[in-house]
Amino acid sequence: MKDIEIESTNYNEKPFPFVLHTNQTSAADGFYTNWHLEIEVILVLEGAENISIDDTVYTALPGDIAVINSGKIHTGSTADWRHHCLIPSMEFLNELGIPATGLSLQPLIRDPELTGFYLDMVKQYEQQEGPYRAALTRISAGRLLLELYKRYSSATLPDGAEKKAGDFAITVRVIRFLRENFTRNFSIDEISAGIGITTAYMCRCVKQTTGLTIVEHLNLIRCRAAYHYLANTDRKVHEVAAACGFNGNSYFAKTFRNTMGISPSAVRKKKQK
C-alpha cells in the first residue's frame, strides 16, 4: 500500500504560474491518497476514474472535469485512465481576482465548453517554443479558471476569512503525523507536543485550513486504508480494523460507514463479486 502523500508543488522553476501535466496515464498500481493546498483540475481523456474526495466518490468519464479543492484528502481508484492535470498556484488565482481560499469548485463538472477551453490551453502549452507560447498558454489557463469559478464555485469560508501560511504549515505537519502513525494509538496532545504548540491552537489551524477536524482527518486516512485492504486483500474484517488503528470491530464498522458511506461487509461483498 502506498503512503498517503502531502503534495508540495514548486512553481519557481516553471515558466508558468501553474503546473500542467498532459496525457498522463494512471496505471493500476494500487491505493494512493494525497492532500495539498492548491486546487487540482483534471480533464479525463480516456477510461474512467473513481475519485474519492472526503466522504464522496465521483466517477469521472472522458470529457469530464474533476476538481480537487484546497485541503481535500483524495483517493484514486486502480482503474487505467488518461488525463490532463492543471495545478494553479495560489498567486496566479489571486492575480485573476479569484479568492481561492474562500471559494470551492464543484467536484465533478460536465461542461463541453469548458472542456474545449481546457483542450485549447493544452494545445497552446504543447506548441513549439515561440515568442507568444507562454503568454497564450497563460491567457488560456486564466480563461479556463475564471469560467470555472464563475460557473461552478460556492463560498466555503465566512467573509474576510483567510488561510495563513503558518496555519497551513502546521496543518501539513499534523497530516504528516497522522499519515505516519495512523496504525497505532496516540493522543492529540502527543501531536501538539511534537510540534511545540498548544493543542487548542493546533486544532484550530487544521479546522480553519481544511474544514475538517484532526479526528475527521484521522478517520479518513484510516478508512481509506481499510477500504484498500477490504477491496484488494483477503484479510478478515477484524484484521483490517486492527491493521488500520481501530480498537474494536463495532467502532470500526460505525466509523467506516459514517466516513465512507458504505459498510465494511458491503465492500467485501463487492470484492467477491
Image (cartoon, rainbow, N blue to C red):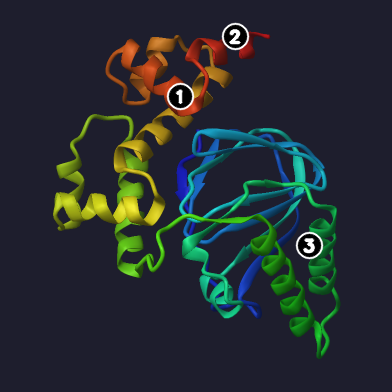
Amino acid type shown at disc 1? Ala
Residue placed furthest toward the front: 159
Label number found at residue 199:
none
Q: Would you name the residue on which mark 2 appears?
A: 269
Amino acid type shown at disc 3? Tyr
Instruction: Give the crowd class for mark 3: few <14, some 14-19, many >=20 residues within 10 Å.
Output: many
Q: SS at mark 1?
A: helix
Question: Would you say 206 lies left or right of 268 here?
Answer: left
Residue placed furthest toward the bottom: 131
At 52% from the left and 65% from the top, the residue drawn is 100
Question: Would you say 126 lies left or right of 84 here?
Answer: right
Of the numbered discs 2 and 1, the one sitting upstream in the chain is 1
* Position above or below: 143 against 221: below
Instruction: Give the crowd class for mark 2: few <14, some 14-19, many >=20 residues within 10 Å.
Output: few
Quadrant (top left/top right/bottom left/bottom right) for the C terminus: top right
Question: Would you say 262 lies left or right of 165 here?
Answer: right
At 30% from the left and 37% from the top, the residue drawn is 215
Q: Is residue 173 visible?
A: no
Give the Cα distance between marks 2 and 1.
Answer: 14 Å
